[in-house]
């Protein structure tokens, strides 16, 4: 029994030893040391800030405002101005010397009260640097005192009332500039042409009842009086008049040799349609828009309505045919006087003046733009934009006649003459 217990003890002891050996951690081999690696450093190009340069910042914007008749009976005039200005801004790349152009509009409805409100908005609320407008003389005349009070440069592109001349520049308002000729400037040569061309002894005068219409007739009456021509009828009509027949009947009975119209396209088309119906035989002359592409469109149902009208105009497609092509491509509509006036006021007047301010390292301000306009001297396809001491420029006039095509199916404008216009005496206006 003792011998058996002895063997049991030995067995247990051996088992414990074997178990301890099995559980002991194995001896590990030391891994060979790795070769040290060389760190690769990628050098980045230095940024503008690291080189001490300031990041590019957007330059101060230039704010341009239009006040024009965007609603009402002559809304097509304001729309035309707007289209011309938009095209000019697009062709300038939307900026002048890196300064972005911001463009805003205000509706003057071609009447004095709304013109004052429109210009007040542009000056005080929109805080524009310069204004283009107002598209028709009544709005322009009413707005000029506010332009002066607000000390904001205003470039006029089509307002032709002669009285404006004596109120701007040395006339008292140094903030108003006109790039188009007025009716007194144009009347000197055109009045003589009418008398000579038709051997006129008696003439009828017809105009819209606005500062444009009355201003023009006021310029021509003394000229006809000096030339010995008798004014046998004189009539004025509100914009959008539908019935001209009573005046046309009196005109026919008067035996007039010629009639001088002062209308824009819509009223001219309506007047001439009834003129042909009543059967007046007098030769037709015009100061307005009676030979424009829009007039041709309005009378395309019967081209004879507009045929034979002779007109003295400015800013006509024939003066700048390349602009006419670009305008047609952009808007799918023909270039007219107001559309060209808006384009020229922006592209050939304000843009060069503002560019001059920037190039002279001056702040873009209303006063600096005004000063730059005073020294402007820009050659354009329609003549030179250079202002006299009354802030009046003398772009060219052009004599146009509506003629039927050979097949008689349409009317085309034929250029009779391009006239270099010069200063005239504005005493009394």
Image (cartoon, rainbow, N blue to C red):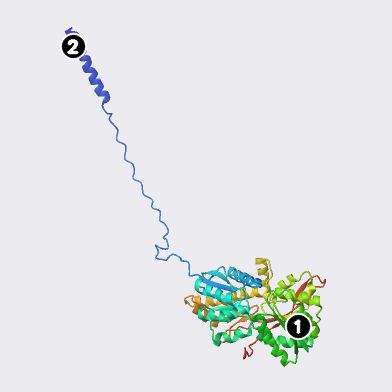
The location of residue 178, given as percent across then percent down, is: 60, 81
Q: Image quadrant of residue 271?
A: bottom right
> In this figure, which residue is indicated by the disc labeled 1?
259
Name of the residue lying farthest toward the top: 1
Q: Residues within 10 Å of mark 2 (few under 14, many from 20)?
A: few
Q: Neighbour class for label 1 at 10 Å: few (<14), some, many (≥20)?
A: many
At x 78% / y 69%, what residue is drawn?
A: 301
Is residue 306 at all visible to an observer of this figure?
no
Q: Tell me the distance, in whole angstroms, between the alpha carbons under discs 1 and 2.
A: 154 Å
Q: How many marks?
A: 2
Considering the image in quadrants, where does the N terminus appear?
top left
Residue 145 position within the rendered picture, expressed as x and y whole percent measured from the top left: 54, 81
Left or right, 36 with respect to 374, comes to left
| Residue 259 in sight here | yes
User: Residue at the location (72% across, 89% down)?
Assistant: 224
Question: Looking at the rendering, which quadrant does residue 45 occupy?
Answer: bottom left
Q: Nearer the viewer, residue 55 or 357?
A: 357
Q: On the rendered structure, is 174 left or right of 70?
A: left
- The percent position of residue 282, horizontal first and vertical second, equals 79, 82
Viewport quadrant of the C terminus: bottom right
Residue 212 in the image: x percent, y percent?
65, 81
Outermost residue on the right side: it is 407
Q: Earlier in the sequence, mark 1 or mark 2?
A: 2
Q: Mark 2 sits on what residue?
A: 6
Relative depth, front residue between 429 and 347: 429
Question: Which disc is residue 428 wearing?
Answer: none
Secondary structure type for disc 2: helix
């Amino acid at each position: 029994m003792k011998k058996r217990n002895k063997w049991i003890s030995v067995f247990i002891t051996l088992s414990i030893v074997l178990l301890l050996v099995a559980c002991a951690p194995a001896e590990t081999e030391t891994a060979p040391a790795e070769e040290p690696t060389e760190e690769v450093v990628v050098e980045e190009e230095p940024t503008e800030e690291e080189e001490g340069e300031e990041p590019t910042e957007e330059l101060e914007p230039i704010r341009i405002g239009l006040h024009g008749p965007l609603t009402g009976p002559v809304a097509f005039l304001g729309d035309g101005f707007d289209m011309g200005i938009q095209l000019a801004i697009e062709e300038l790349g939307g900026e002048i010397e890196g300064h972005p152009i911001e463009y805003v509009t205000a509706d003057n409805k071609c009447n004095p009260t709304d013109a004052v409100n429109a210009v007040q908005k542009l000056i005080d609320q929109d805080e524009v640097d310069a204004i283009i407008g107002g598209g028709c003389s009544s709005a322009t005349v009413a707005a000029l005192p506010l332009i002066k009070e607000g000390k904001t440069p205003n470039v006029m592109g089509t307002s032709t009332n002669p009285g404006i001349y004596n109120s701007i520049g040395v006339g008292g308002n140094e903030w108003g500039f006109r790039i188009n000729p007025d009716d007194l400037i144009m009347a000197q040569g055109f009045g003589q042409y009418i008398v000579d061309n038709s051997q006129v002894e008696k003439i009828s005068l017809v105009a819209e009842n606005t500062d444009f219409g009355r201003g023009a007739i006021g310029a021509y009456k003394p000229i006809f009086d000096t030339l010995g021509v008798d004014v046998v009828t004189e009539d004025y009509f509100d914009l959008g008049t539908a019935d001209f027949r009573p005046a046309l009947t009196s005109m026919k009975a008067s035996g007039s040799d010629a009639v001088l119209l002062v209308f824009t396209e819509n009223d001219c088309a309506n007047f001439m349609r009834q003129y042909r119906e009543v059967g007046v035989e007098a030769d037709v002359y015009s100061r307005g828009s009676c030979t424009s592409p829009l007039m041709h469109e309005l009378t395309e149902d019967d081209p004879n309505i507009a045929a034979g009208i002779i007109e003295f105009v400015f800013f006509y497609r024939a003066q700048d045919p390349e602009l006419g092509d670009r305008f047609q491509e952009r808007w799918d509509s023909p270039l007219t006087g107001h559309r060209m006036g808006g384009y020229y006021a922006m592209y050939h007047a304000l843009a060069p003046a503002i560019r001059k301010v920037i190039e002279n390292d001056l702040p873009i301000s209303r006063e600096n733009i005004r000063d730059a306009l005073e020294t402007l001297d820009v050659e354009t396809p329609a003549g030179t934009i250079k202002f006299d001491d009354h802030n009046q420029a003398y772009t060219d006039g052009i004599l146009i006649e509506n003629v039927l095509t050979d097949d008689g199916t349409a009317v085309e404008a034929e250029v009779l003459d391009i006239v270099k216009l010069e200063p005239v005496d504005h005493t009394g206006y």
